[in-house]
């Protein structure tokens, strides 16, 4: 069996985000005429395996090359893909796949899968933790926006108090409204402070998780 020497790019630099985009775009024609006519099916399989494509990928190659009366060499393709999967099914790729929240499609087998999934799950933990931080940050943004609205509303009421306070009842109405707004503002300031502290704590926890999972 021919062996392809793993490149530095494929082993260490290959971003899983590109793998995800390739999977999304895999419904497009996979091979051009020149590629079909000159295909080394072992190499084609190897490249597909190193990118994490499923075995169904060969069906797309077959469809792309059928119009040129070219039939893929299935055995050579599968042998090449198996070799390529040795590069794809690494803890590093598993971790990156999890961090980006991309799905695992059961491409790996045996001990490779165990190591891949262990790293994948750790990456997925980080992905979900980031999602939670993002949720808290959105909540904080809404609270700060509401605080700005309250400050403007309180300022308006205070101005009204000095300009429209023509009788005791009107003064009391405005003061009561200001007290209600102040109460909401105080609760909101407390919630904002608590949320900021929570986000800071979560970001530190995230940094620790990332440091523990360096490759």
Image (cartoon, grey):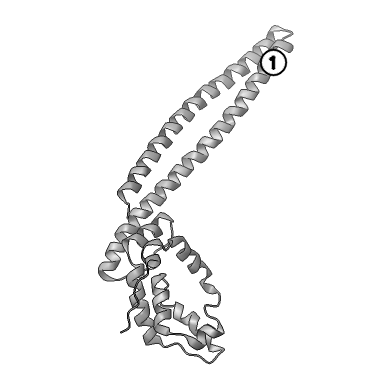
Label 1's element?
helix
Query: What residue is pinned by disc 1?
Result: 159
Quarter location, residue 81 = bottom left
Pick whichever, 72 or 192, lies toward us: 72
View extreme (bottom): residue? 69
* Quadrant in the picture for the N terminus: bottom left
Q: In this view, does 112 lie above or below 186?
A: below
* Quadrant in the picture for the C terminus: bottom left
Estimate the x, y position of residue 91 in percent, counting from the top left: 31, 61
Question: Image check: 25 left or right of 16?
Answer: right
Residue at 50%, 65% in the rendered image:
21
Residue at 58%, 32% in the rendered image:
145
Q: In this view, does 95 lie above or below 28?
A: above
Pick whichever, 152 or 169, lies toward us: 152
Question: Image check: 173 left or right of 188?
Answer: right
Estimate the x, y position of residue 162 in percent, counting from the top left: 70, 11
Neighbour tally class for label 1: few under 14, some 14-19, many 20 plus, Cα within 10 Å: few
Pick whichever, 44 or 64, lies toward us: 44
Estimate the x, y position of residue 184 in percent, counting from the top left: 54, 24
Quarter location, residue 160 = top right
């Amino acid at each position: 069996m021919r062996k392809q020497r793993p490149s530095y790019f494929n082993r260490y630099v290959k971003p899983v985000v590109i793998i995800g985009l390739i999977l999304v775009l895999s419904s497009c024609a996979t091979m051009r005429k020149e590629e079909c006519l000159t295909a080394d099916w072992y190499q084609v399989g190897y490249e597909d395996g190193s990118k994490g494509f499923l075995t169904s990928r060969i069906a797309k190659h077959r469809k792309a090359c059928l119009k040129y009366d070219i039939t893929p060499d299935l055995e050579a393709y599968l042998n090449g893909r198996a070799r390529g999967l040795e590069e794809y099914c690494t803890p590093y790729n598993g971790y990156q796949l999890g961090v980006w929240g991309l799905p695992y499609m059961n491409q790996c087998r045996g001990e490779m899968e165990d190591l891949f999934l262990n790293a994948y799950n750790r990456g997925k933990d980080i992905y979900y933790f980031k999602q939670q931080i993002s949720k808290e940050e959105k909540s904080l943004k809404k609270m700060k926006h509401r605080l700005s609205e309250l400050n403007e509303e309180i300022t308006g009421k205070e101005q009204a108090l000095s300009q429209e306070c023509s009788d005791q009842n009107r003064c009391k109405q405005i003061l009561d409204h200001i007290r209600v707004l102040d109460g909401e503002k105080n609760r909101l300031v407390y919630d904002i402070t608590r949320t900021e502290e929570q986000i800071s704590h979560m970001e530190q926890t995230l940094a620790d998780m990332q440091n523990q999972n360096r490759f």
